[in-house]
């Protein structure tokens, strides 16, 4: 598992460095868990139709030309399994764009956009998520369809495979004349791990950097701030993008839910969280920007649990 190894070393080095503060038993269990990930013990458990499956995603990638349609079909199947029928509307719009003859598209006819589809993700009471694009569909689905209690390696492999499928999807969108601003540039994983005895528990979620123009973009940032109020405390560091723009702003909104569900299942144990964001087009890891770094520190301080940026150079 050459892909996972550097991240394993990073997480392991971090834990070795900080294990004085962590209960020895939990540290050992998490290390063992990460080692299993390294040995490639990425096993399909239960029915694969419910969860993102590394095997299935890999098969889709091998379909080359057909992989974009296959990917949308796959997302459709998972939406149906989880009864997220609202997502089908967004996926059908994407099918329309992908199948559209690009020369026709350059005329006055623009792809129809029915506006956002509202979906309830368990971000917390009264919080909702508006799905504006296929990226939003993947995020919404990932909240359910990232298998619980998977090893870190499996989450990373799924992130890398989704990255490649989304990159192909993006290049189709570009070919069909879809504006750059509507194409997400980075994909992020947030995964939390906790251990009790020999049992290790985990949760993971996928998110994307913001897409859209003008008012739509501002509305999405407002919504991201509602779903993740800590974003309001993040200062604008004078970057080319505002707080709320990055993939982390989407994944971190699920942190509280993941953290609480793990805590409920394993009591008072320490919880480790890792974040890994990749460039969709090139696949290279993108470290936290100054704003995401501050966001992670705010959340760490509140929850008193560490968040490790697997993409950071230090
Ligand atoms: Zn950022």
Image: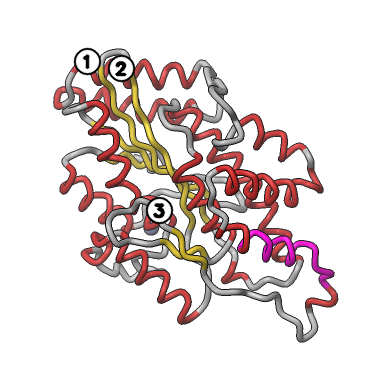
> In which quadrant of this rendering is ligand 1 seen?
bottom left
Report if the beta carbon of the residue with label 1 is closer than 8 angstroms to ligand 1: no
Q: How far apart are marks 2 and 1 (CA)?
A: 6 Å
Query: Mark number for residue 195?
Result: none
Q: Can residue 32 be seen in this view?
A: yes
Image location (x, y in percent) of residue 144: 46, 43
260 versus 177 height, above or below = above
Query: Mark number for residue 25?
Result: 1
Asked if residue 100 is among those painted magenta in the image, a careful observer would answer yes
Q: Is residue 135 left or right of residue 175?
A: left
Image location (x, y in percent) of residue 15: 27, 26
Residue assigned mark 3: 121
Asked if residue 121 is among those painted magenta in the image, a careful observer would answer no
- Mark earlier in primary sequence (3, 2): 2
Highlighted magenta segment, given as a residue range: 90-102
Q: Is mark 2 on a helix, strand or loop?
A: helix
Q: Is mark 1 on a helix, strand or loop?
A: helix
Q: Is mark 3 on a helix, strand or loop?
A: loop
Q: Which of 174 and 226 is in front in this view?
A: 226
Q: Which quadrant of the figure has residue 307? A: top left
Residues marked 2 and 1 touching at CB (< 8 Å): yes
How many tags in the picture?
3
Residue assigned mark 2: 29
The structure's colour scheme is secondary structure
The residue lying at 32 percent from left, 37 percent from top is: 273
Q: In this view, does 197 lie to the left or right of 74?
A: left
Q: Which of marks 1 and 3 is in front?
A: 3
């Amino acid at each position: 598992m050459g892909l996972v190894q550097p991240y394993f070393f990073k997480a392991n080095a971090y834990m070795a460095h900080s294990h004085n503060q962590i209960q020895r038993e939990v540290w050992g269990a998490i290390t063992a868990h990460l080692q299993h990930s390294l040995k490639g013990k990425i096993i399909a458990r239960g029915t694969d139709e419910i969860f993102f499956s590394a095997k299935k995603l890999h098969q889709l990638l091998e379909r080359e030309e057909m992989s974009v349609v296959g990917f949308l079909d796959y997302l459709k199947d998972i939406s149906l399994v989880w009864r997220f029928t609202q997502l089908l509307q967004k996926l059908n719009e994407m099918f329309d764009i992908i199948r559209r003859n690009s020369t026709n598209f350059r005329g006055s006819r623009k792809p129809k956009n029915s506006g956002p589809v509202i979906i309830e993700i368990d971000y917390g009471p009264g919080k909702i998520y508006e799905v504006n694009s296929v990226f939003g569909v993947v995020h919404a689905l990932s909240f359910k369809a990232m298998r619980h209690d998977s090893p870190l390696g499996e989450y990373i492999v799924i992130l890398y495979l989704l990255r490649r499928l989304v990159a192909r999807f993006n290049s189709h969108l570009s070919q069909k004349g879809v504006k750059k601003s509507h194409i997400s540039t980075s994909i992020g994983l947030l995964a939390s791990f906790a251990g009790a005895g020999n049992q290790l528990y985990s949760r993971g979620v996928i998110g994307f950097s913001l897409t859209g123009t003008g008012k739509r973009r501002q509305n999405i940032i407002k919504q991201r701030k509602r779903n993740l109020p800590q974003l309001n405390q993040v200062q604008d560091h004078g970057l080319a993008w505002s707080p709320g723009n990055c993939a982390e702003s989407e994944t971190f909104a699920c942190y509280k839910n993941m953290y609480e569900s793990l805590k409920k299942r394993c009591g008072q144990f320490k919880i480790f969280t890792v974040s890994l964001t990749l460039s969709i087009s090139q696949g290279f890891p993108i470290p936290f920007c100054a704003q995401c770094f501050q966001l992670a520190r705010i959340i760490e301080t509140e929850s008193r649990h560490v968040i490790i940026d697997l993409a950071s150079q230090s």
